Image: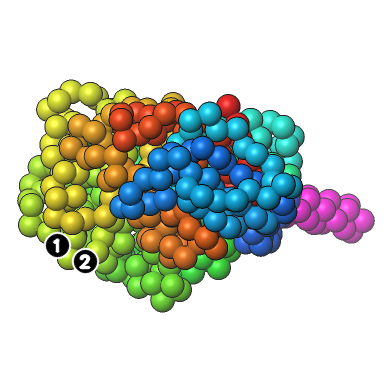
Amino acid sequence: MRKFLFRSLLALCLIALLLVAAVWTIEFYPQRNSHPPLKLAKGTLAIEHARIYVSPTDAPIADGTVLIRDGLIAEVGPNVVIPADAQKVACNGCVVTAGFWNAHVHFTEPKWKWAEWKAADKLDAQLADMFLSRGFTTVVDLGSNPAETFAIRRRVERGEVRGPYIYTAGTALYPPHGIPFYLKETLPGWMTAIMPQPATPVAAQAVVRRNLGSGADVTKLFTGSWVERGHVLPMPLNIVKAAVETTHLNGKIVFAHPSNLAGTQAAVQGGVDVLAHVPDDTRGITPELFTTMVKQNMGMVPTLKMFTTTVTSDPHYMDPMYAEVWQFKADGGTLIFGTDVGYMTDYSTEQEFTELGKCGLGWQDVLAMLTTSPAARLGQSGQKGTIAPGKLADLTILSADPAVELTNFSKVQAVVRSGAVIWQR
Ligand SMILES: [Zn+2]
């Protein structure tokens, strides 16, 4: 009897040990070394006879050269002497801008599962399809499984696969009992149950500290969550404030999903830095609220194509959102480019540019959304956002001029990151 008990206990211990080992291997091992150092490519690259938009506000260089040395911009201008050893990047009347940012993406589709162990060529193709072929050299993941995002980031930065630089929010925070209906409908119950829905300010601070401690770069809050069709649950203000305070104490910023008036008010009063969407239920939202947002220096990522393709293109739904984006911009607000790819499975960017045009934005506004504004918001103006000597050689090369037609921002010919051509059409 005693022998039997001993054996059973031993078997149970073994099973428990195996379970712990499995969870560690799947969830925690891929999260190691979450901030690998940036590697700069060696050598000299030249892009000749290009139309160069060094920034959204400088006059374009009609026929110029960008010279890159060891990962950084060495020179840019109309009369640059190209050294004999420089490798030339095909241009043929191309347009060169600073590398694009997409400040709202997710790695939540099933194809990113097991990113730690996925074949490099497969991961390469996925990253090219989702980001590089769209011109993105930097992306901000606003909520995914950190095991996936950190594994992808590490493999990209080590040079195993080609991809953009990735910032991540780790896991997003939801209101108590506040998982959105579209996640409840698509994810298994056990998964939505473990998603952070802190009920107290102290619990919210603990989630934020854990996220940032494990390597997240920003915080994402659902200050307004569509818990049912037609019903938004706002996050209690004391929870928003606690999460924001802890994030700011760590020198990081907070993105929020607002949804409606209550969700936007919670974000504004709670001190959130960037709205991850334009509020889509616009009822009750006044111009004064936007004025307050601008005064607080809040940014906004409109994600208009996501709304028009995944909800409805009905003008009754979309027109007020175009008006909100225009109002925010007219008041001096900072718009940032983002598409919500990952949640949205169509990765093409052309329609987002069309939608931004419908808001009354010009190509310089959109170029700022793609480059200088996100770089400034993430504290990277010294390294990214414009084409200037000493900055990182992150460049997007287009085959057509966006000043002529906004959708030409989607005609990507090649992408340079940290001085290497990482994608070419
Ligand atoms: Zn999203």
Task: Name the residue: 60% across, 32% down.
Answer: 90
Asked if residue 94 shows in the view, the reply is: yes
Question: x, y (%) of residue 115?
Answer: 66, 41
**Which segment is the magenta one?**
1-22
Q: Kindly tell me whether mark 2's CB lies below 8 Å from ligand 1.
A: no
Query: What residue is pinned by disc 2?
Result: 296
Q: Per the image, is 9 magenta?
A: yes
Mark 2 residue type: Gln
Q: Is residue 232 above or below residue 263?
A: above
Task: Name the residue: 69% across, 42% down.
Answer: 87
Residue 210 numbered mark, or none: none
Asked if residue 170 shows in the view, the reply is: no
Q: Is residue 348 above or below residue 240?
A: above
Res 337 quadrant in image: top left
Residue 292 numbered mark, or none: 1
Q: Would you say 79 lies left or right of 36 here?
A: left
Secondary structure of the residue carrying tag 2 is loop
